[in-house]
Amino acid sequence: MIDPHPLRWGLAVLAAMIAAPCMAATQQPPAQAAPSINLIRDGACQGASTLSGSGLDGVGPGDVAWLPWTVGDGPFRLHATIVLERFATEGAGLAIAGGILGLDDPEHDVVPRGGRFGPPAPLAELRAVPARPGVPIQFVAQWDGKKLRLSTDGVEVGSIALDAAHGRIGIAGPSAAIRVIECTIDGPVHRVPVPTIVFSAADGPIDEHRDPVAAAGPDSIEIVALAVTTRDDGTLDHAIRRRSLRSGTLGPAMPIDVGGIEPGRATIGHDGSGWVLLVQPMSKDLLATSVEVFTSRDTIAWKHAGTIDAGAAPVRLMAVGMRKHGADALEAAATRVVDGSPRACVVRGSGASWSIHDLTTTPSCDPVWAGVDQASIRVPRLPQRWVTPGDRAVPCPSTAQPFWVGASGGSYVTAQGPRNDRLVVASAGDGSIDWVAWDGPVGSVCGASLGNRTWAIFEGGVRAPREHVLLMQLPD
């Protein structure tokens, strides 16, 4: 049983960290630290893409073509041969260290912006190297653990104090203004696929998609999210949208008809014979006294199968796909309020028969699955998580919702940073960050596995966490 008192929690965490051996991250791609790893060769990079799927030659203004590489934690030296076709201050440059190094300003060599660099600000008042359109330049970015030093054609053009410089590498457009002919790196890098947009805020009248949930069936992963639209009178309308992932390919976005219920949360799962959707009606505090059950054979036509009564303990579903329980039942992660106190629980059942079961009787919340038959829960106001059944403490880099990877639960994917401004893969043994999966604002994270492939699905973007719902296959 979990002790609710913070002091004893802290002692338990310290004891667990000393006594428990560190678990290896199950999905960490092998680091490549050999000299001069080729990222771009002869102007091409297989796997490079914008979030919408355009390659290096199709990058629009303000967009980034991300390379399928992320820099690990350690010193590195990146060298690129770059041709700037024009100097029109369009923001063309390199995306690195969670920001962008703008190279196309006619009066300044480098104008860092965004991420760890903050608002746009030139490193020097005047150019040290003349702006010459169409002429190749040799650009070097070298991080020694304290400073990111930048040089052009052998001339140092500035440095930026950074305590961390790991993250994804990309080319900031427009592609008509910049061409990267060659790019190599000396240092720890991981090859990681580029995320793909599942749902976007810029999707017709829809303002945003939030709280994505994913679950695997026999031959597909179904991804659902709440679509938020502003009505003419200024109020918000909420609906459920779905996309199928089959053999790595996304199907079209489709609405799910839930019979006039305005959803506040939803989760999905497959019980072995068909799909089940739980829908929590919208409420101001995202707590509901009932949950509606829908079933489907094909994820297209849905039938109302029953209502789960939460009684005097209102419940909030977690944005996590359901998992199997026993032979043909499912369970959904949730938090309910019992006599004014939050309690981690599961909503469990099949067909029209469902019930709610507590994971612990002490104050707790936000359960997510951790391995085959365990759950990771959080105690309010504490950053650590605990795995139950049992009392194993898991240090987490933030209080954001994580996605535990693999049957052993040896690593997890979660938002991290002062404002959840990056997505990381961390070890469940000691909370250390293995690699950065995405640089940019991140919201909720979930995921699913089908066959031998695992995908992370998360709210994320360049400017706001709910700019998109993104899908990224995790390395084997």
Image (tube, grey):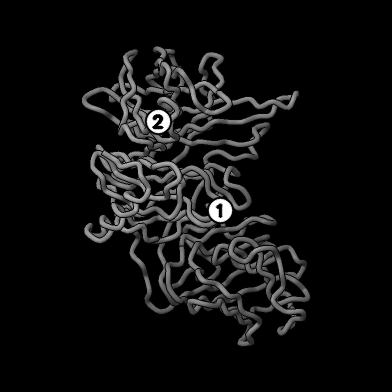
Query: Can residue 293 be spotted in the picture?
Result: no
Q: Earlier in the sequence, mark 2 or mark 1?
A: 2
Point out which mark residue 302 bears.
none
> Residue at the spot x=46%, y=67% of the render?
71
Name the residue located 47 percent from the left edge and 38 percent from the top edge.
Answer: 250
Q: Amino acid at mark 1?
A: Arg
When the figure is inspected, residue 43 is found, relative to residue 453, above or below; the finding is below
Q: Secondary structure at mark 1?
A: loop
* Residue 155 at x, y percent in the picture: 64, 87
The x and y percentages for residue 125 are 76, 79
Residue at image coords 31%, 42%:
3
Instruction: Give the secondary structure at mark 2.
Output: strand
Query: Which amino acid type is shown beneath numbered disc 2?
Result: Ala
Counting labels gives 2
Q: Which residue is mark 1?
A: 419
Give the image location of residue 276, x and y in percent: 38, 22
In the picture of the structure, the residue carrying the numbered disc 2 is: 334
Q: Is residue 402 visible?
A: yes
Quarter of the N terminus within the rendering: top left
Q: Viewer-proximal residue, 294 or 17?
A: 17
Which residue is painted at 53% across and 23% down in the image?
Answer: 263
- Where residue 348 appears, x then y in whole percent? 32, 24
Side of 245 relative to 205 (left or right): left
Classify 244 as above or below 98.
Answer: above
Name the side, left or right, on which 117 lies relative to 393.
right
Alpha carbons under labels 2 and 1: distance apart: 25 Å
Q: Are marks 2 and 1 in contact (CB under 8 Å)?
A: no
Quarter holding residue 127: bottom right
The residue at the far bottom in this view is 154
Q: Is residue 341 above or below residue 176?
A: above
